[in-house]
Image (cartoon, rainbow, N blue to C red):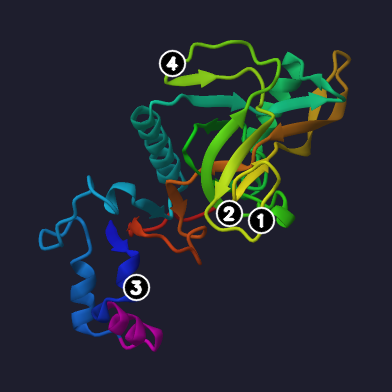
Amino acid sequence: MVALKEQMHITNPVWLDFLQHLRVGHVQEDHVAMLRTLVLTNPKSHHINFGTPPWSNALLITPHHAVRWIWNDTALRKHGKEALCMILEFHAEDTIKGEPLTLGKHYAALLRHQRTDLKQCRQELPEVVRLAYGMKVMVTQNVETVLDITNGAQGIIVDIWLHPEEPPFNQQQPITKLKYVPVCILMKLDRTRATQLNNLEESIIPVEPTCKPYRITCQTAEGKYVTHTVRRCQFLVTAAYAFTDYRSQGQTIPAVVVDIATPPTGA
């Protein structure tokens, strides 16, 4: 793990000298020694207090999707505990011609998702989403380019509009499973060029669930195979406490911990 902060890229002359040499492929021994002082497992590394800003809010950059999932889940639970707010969990809404999936069709959908390769899975709507007031989120695909709700857009959740038929739930539980997908979430974007909307504060944008189709194949009682088109509705957002190295490109991050372990091979 390597720890970096934004100021290093802007004002630190040693770091700027390293970048200038790196740009032309002439990195020196003193540059390598400097980089090693940033490795957290190095006994000679600079002491970092992760309990104080900016390190208390440091993000993780990792090539491992599993590490990202675990980090985001842990960070979200920490946020819920510190902010004294519930974490709302809800499954995607899958329907065929407006009707919920039967048990057999739901099983076929599960088999289909299990056989889908990782690259295709990233282009599909997630099965489960967890949201909480004040949490950091990132949009994972283009939703509404006019409102700057685009792939990689980041912000915080300022409000969650529940489905009007959502039954009452125990507000003392740390994680509450909703019956329905929320109607809308209000997201305060870190950066936006969108015009301020009526009755909303500056940079706050409404985000609605996205709907996408996918196909499943089911076997009938007569042994025939029938293909159905399933319509899935879900939010294209994820917790933004950890990113893959791919998604971190082009971002300005105040403080970051970089996972420099050997990346995984294969798909």
Residue 247 got which mark? none
Residue range in magenta is 15-26
- Whether pointer 4 and pointer 2 mark residues with C-beta atoms closer than 8 Å, the reply is no
Residue 213 in the image: state x and y as whole percent. Answer: 79, 38
Kind of element beneath mark 2? loop
Which quarter of the rendered picture does the N terminus lie within?
bottom left
Q: Which residue is mark 1?
A: 148
Badge 3 crowding class, 10 Å Cα cut-off, few under 14, some 14 to 19, many 20 or more, is: few
Residue at x-position 34% and y-position 48%: 57
- Mark 1 and mark 2: Cα distance apart in space: 7 Å
Residue 153 got which mark? 2
- Whether pointer 1 and pointer 4 mark residues with C-beta atoms closer than 8 Å, the reply is no
Q: Earlier in the sequence, mark 1 or mark 4?
A: 1
Is residue 178 visible in the rendered image? The answer is: yes
Residue at x-position 52% and y-position 48%: 155
- Whether pointer 2 and pointer 3 mark residues with C-beta atoms closer than 8 Å, the reply is no
Q: Which residue is mark 4?
A: 173
Badge 2 crowding class, 10 Å Cα cut-off, few under 14, some 14 to 19, many 20 or more, is: some
Q: Earlier in the sequence, mark 1 or mark 2?
A: 1
- Mark 1 and mark 4: Cα distance apart in space: 34 Å
Q: Which residue is mark 3?
A: 9
Total marks in image: 4
Q: Where 147 falls versus 167 (above or below)? A: below
Q: Where 44 falls versus 165 (above or below)? A: below
Q: Earlier in the sequence, mark 4 or mark 3?
A: 3
- Whether pointer 1 and pointer 2 mark residues with C-beta atoms closer than 8 Å, the reply is yes
Residue 106, image quadrant: top right
Residue type for callout 3: His
Kind of element beneath mark 4? loop
In-front residue for pair 172/100: 172
